[in-house]
Image: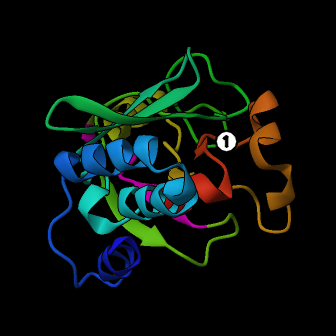
Amino acid sequence: MTLFWRCAVCTGTGTKVDLAVLTTLKVLCSRKIVLRRVVWLTIGCLVSSPAFALPHADRIVVHKKAHTMELMHAGRVIKTYKIALGRNPIGPKQRERDFRTPEGVYVINSRNAKSQCHRSLHISYPNAADRERARRLGVSPGGDVSIHGILNGYGYLGAAHRRWDWTYGCIAVTDEEIDEI
């Protein structure tokens, strides 16, 4: 029964998985020592199934000072990531090549699976206020700001890339994290 249920969930043909099922499996695990491995494999399978997937984020909030990025859904944080920012992270982006990460309200307006970094989500910087500020200063506001993975060929750095701020103004996460996002 356990193996059938596991396979049915993995292939998406099983019944809806809920907390009661996990509780039942946990109780079974505590009573039947012999089945412990099978049951925990099943629980791992269930938790990674689409029925237990995190909700899709409807907002991304970046806390530059804390070097964190939160994915949110309906006002609740569903996942937090540690990030690397532009080489000059203090203050808002004001012009092209100032190595600052923008501050403001933007939207994710495109995806790029073939960027020079392992995947990227383009941010709608500059917005109207950014363009006006740059016009008053007589400079280009810049652009091409995104949330992305590590530079192609350097994915082996993993979380170590966060030890320093290294981007031109983007928000960087690990390759595995951008795949998840």
In percent of width and height, residue 141 lies at 48, 42
User: Is 57 drawn above or below residue 98 in the view shown?
Assistant: below
Query: Is residue 125 highlighted in magenta?
Result: yes
Whether residue 87 is in magenta: the answer is no
Q: Residues within 10 Å of mark 1 (few under 14, many from 20)?
A: some
Horizontal side, residue 169 vs residue 133: left or right: right
Of residues 21 and 49, the one drawn nearer to the viewer in this rendering: 21
Segment colored magenta? 119-128
Closer to the camera, 163 or 134?
163
Left or right side of 18 for 148: right
Q: Is residue 52 above or below residue 1?
A: above
53 or 115: nearer the viewer: 53
Residue 166: give x, y in percent of width and height. 77, 38
Q: Quadrant of residue 72?
A: top left
Picture quarter containing residue 3? bottom left
Q: Residue at x 30, y 42 (%)?
A: 106
Can residue 144 be seen from the camera position used here? Answer: no
